[in-house]
Image (tube, helix red, strand yellow):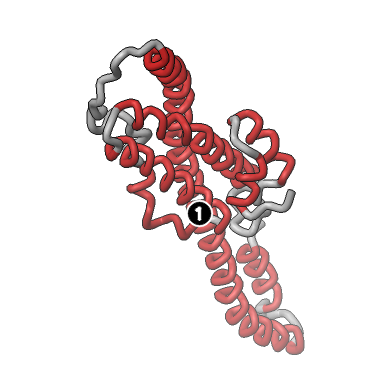
Amino acid sequence: MSIVQFWSSIHSWLADPSAPAWVQAIGSVAAVLFAVWVPAWQRRNSQRDASDNRARQEKEHLKRLSTGLRAEINAALEWAHRRQEALEPVLKGLQDARAKGAAIRREPIQPGSMVVTDAIVYRQIASELGRLPPELIRSVVLFYTLALDIGRIADGAPTAEEAYNSVFGVVPRLKMYAMLLIATLDKFERSDFAIDADIHPKSEEVKKLATKAGYPLDQVLRERGIQP
């Protein structure tokens, strides 16, 4: 039985002409109070429902942002793995050839051939980064700044060998930033997208990722302001 139905049944009893005068008087007062209380109660419920709906929509939006970022970051991480595996034997071959007295052609790389990511998702959501926790914003900006710089640095190198060396030297750092960002996204998702959740990377987590990425632990701890 709804509250309105309940009140209707009570009101019928209180308004019964055969009821004593004092009962009818109570019914009149109760009717006035009820007329005031019901709209207020309905407004509170409506506001609560609207607030809950906005919270659900915000979580769904943050989930889509996280999913899009994760896909783009994973693609960049895969690029870094492949490029590292491809460049290592090339650079070693060039060193061996030079040691044997071979002439190395000094030509630049094909422009754009070392682009890590087009950052399509990042560019699309850049105006919405403020909806993310500060630690996640910082991780996103650090990663994409580095990822976009790699292509520009390689294109600016005078020779292909110098471009390969510059990219090969920064790939471990790129992998480290990508894995840290993914780990931070994981924490944010596990917190049910709570803006005030503790998603700051712990030193032990960073140590494991640094080992996996082949990036100096002390360096990443300094860069991220993390106490060892």
Q: What residue would you read off at disc 1?
A: 137
Name the residue nearer the viewer: 170 or 201.
170
Residue 97 location, x and y as percent?
38, 13
Name the residue nearer the viewer: 97 or 196.
97
Does 15 appear above or below 44? Answer: below
Does 112 appear above or below 202? Answer: above
* Badge 1 density bin: few <14, some 14–19, many ≥20, Cα 10 Å: some
Residue 106 location, x and y as percent?
25, 25
Identity of the amino acid at label 1?
Ile
Relative to residue 163, is residue 56 drawn left or right?
Answer: right
Residue 7 location, x and y as percent?
65, 69
Relative to residue 87, is residue 8 drawn left or right?
Answer: right
What residue do we see at 66% from left, 78% from top? 15
What residue do we see at 42% from left, 23% from top? 83
What residue do we see at 45% from left, 17% from top? 92
Relative to residue 152, is residue 65 drawn left or right?
Answer: right
**Label 1 element class:** helix
Identify the image quadrant of residue 75.
Answer: top left
Name the residue nearer the viewer: 164 or 74.
164
Name the residue nearer the viewer: 181 or 44.
181
Does 52 appear above or below 89? Answer: below
What residue do we see at 26% from left, 32% from top? 112
